[in-house]
């Protein structure tokens, strides 16, 4: 692995680490992080496939109250590096990502606990109007989240591919298969949560139609995307066709009636 690849991976690790707490750009999501790592290592296809698979698992991972979800940032970055460098399959990537997510969960709790110190410092600086100090406190807190992913990534980058290959090969099959099955169960949970959020009665026929097309046709994902877009456009045209003109006519008529009423009142 070249120096430029290592630097690019460290930058990606920093972005994903910060994104795991900022959440605005969603850079910590597996589909984004794995794709960026694949781009840096010259294997975008594997990055996208692994990222899409892990994304289905991560749909069931979310922070609720004080409950901290498994960490997708460190799991996505390191598992993609290991899979691409050691030429492993997607199944092995899932088996690697699950324990990494659990380890990252404990690590992010530790780092978030440390950042409480900087937040209190920012509160003290806010009382005196020290805006520069507030900015520095927040940047230091976010830099810890960046280092949380950068340091493990650097360690993995410095380990030879042969050593990684030997380590992965030494893992018993019962463990890797078990983790793959557990990851598959998590994927099902993620799908169930998405379907539950999309539980809109008048849209269910489209979902059922999609399952039928998937079962009885040879459409790929691009074809299903185009079919879904066409179905959405047809639905919107049938539901809203002509209503804007009717609404405008009704509004115009009501204005005329109001004018007449004003004249009568006058």
Image: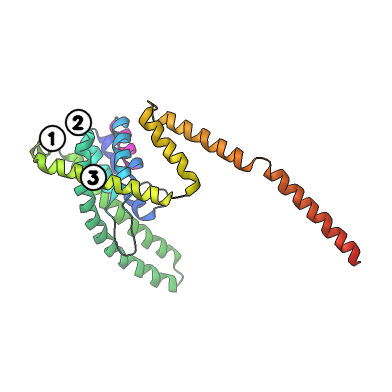
Magenta part of the protein: which range? 33-42
Residue beneath the point at 72% across and 43% down = 245
Give the spatial CA distance, label 1 vs label 2. Answer: 8 Å
Residue 239 locus on image (x, y percent): 60, 42
Give the spatial CA distance, label 3 vs label 1. Answer: 21 Å
Whether 41 is among the magenta residues is yes
Q: Secondary structure at mark 3?
A: helix
Looking at the image, which is closer to me, 241 or 170? 241
- Which of the numbered marks, if any, corresponds to residue 59? none
Give the spatial CA distance, label 2 vs label 3. Answer: 20 Å
Asked where in the image residue 30 lies, by quadrant, the reply is top left
Which one is earlier in the sequence, the residue at label 1 or at label 2?
2
Whether tag 3 and tag 1 are in contact, CB under 8 A, the answer is no
Whether tag 2 and tag 3 are in contact, CB under 8 A, the answer is no
Which residue is labeled 1 in the image?
Answer: 165
Quick one: label 2, few (<14), some, or many (20+) residues within 10 Å? few
Whether tag 1 and tag 2 are in contact, CB under 8 A, the answer is yes
Which one is earlier in the sequence, the residue at label 3 or at label 1?
1
The C terminus sits in image quarter? bottom right
Which residue is labeled 2 in the image?
Answer: 87
Quick one: label 3, few (<14), some, or many (20+) residues within 10 Å? many
Which residue is labeled 3 in the image?
Answer: 183
Q: Is residue 200 above or below residue 214?
A: below
């Amino acid at each position: 692995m070249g120096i430029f690849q290592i630097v690019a991976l460290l930058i990606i690790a920093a972005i994903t680490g910060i994104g795991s707490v900022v959440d605005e750009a969603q850079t910590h999501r597996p589909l984004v992080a794995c794709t960026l790592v694949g781009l840096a290592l010259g294997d975008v296809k594997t990055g996208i496939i692994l990222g899409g698979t892990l994304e289905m698992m991560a749909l069931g991972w979310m922070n609720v109250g004080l409950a901290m979800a498994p960490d997708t940032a460190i799991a996505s970055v390191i598992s993609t590096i290991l899979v691409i460098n050691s030429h492993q399959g997607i199944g092995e990537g899932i088996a690697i990502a699950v324990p990494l997510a659990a380890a990252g969960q404990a690590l992010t709790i530790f780092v978030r606990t440390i950042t409480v110190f900087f937040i209190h410092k920012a509160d003290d600086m806010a009382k005196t109007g020290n805006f520069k100090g507030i900015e520095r406190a927040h940047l230091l807190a976010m830099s810890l989240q960046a280092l949380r992913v950068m340091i493990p990534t650097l360690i993995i980058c410095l380990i030879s591919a042969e050593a990684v290959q030997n380590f992965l090969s030494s893992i018993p099959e019962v463990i890797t298969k078990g983790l793959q099955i557990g990851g598959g169960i998590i994927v099902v949970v993620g799908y169930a949560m998405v379907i539950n959020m999309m539980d809109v009665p008048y849209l269910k026929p489209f979902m059922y139609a999609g399952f039928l097309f998937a079962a009885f046709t040879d459409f790929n994902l691009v074809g299903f995307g185009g079919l879904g877009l066409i179905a959405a456009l047809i639905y919107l045209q049938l539901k809203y066709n002509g209503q804007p003109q009717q609404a405008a006519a009704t509004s115009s008529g009501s204005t005329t009636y109001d004018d007449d009423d004003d004249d009568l009142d006058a």
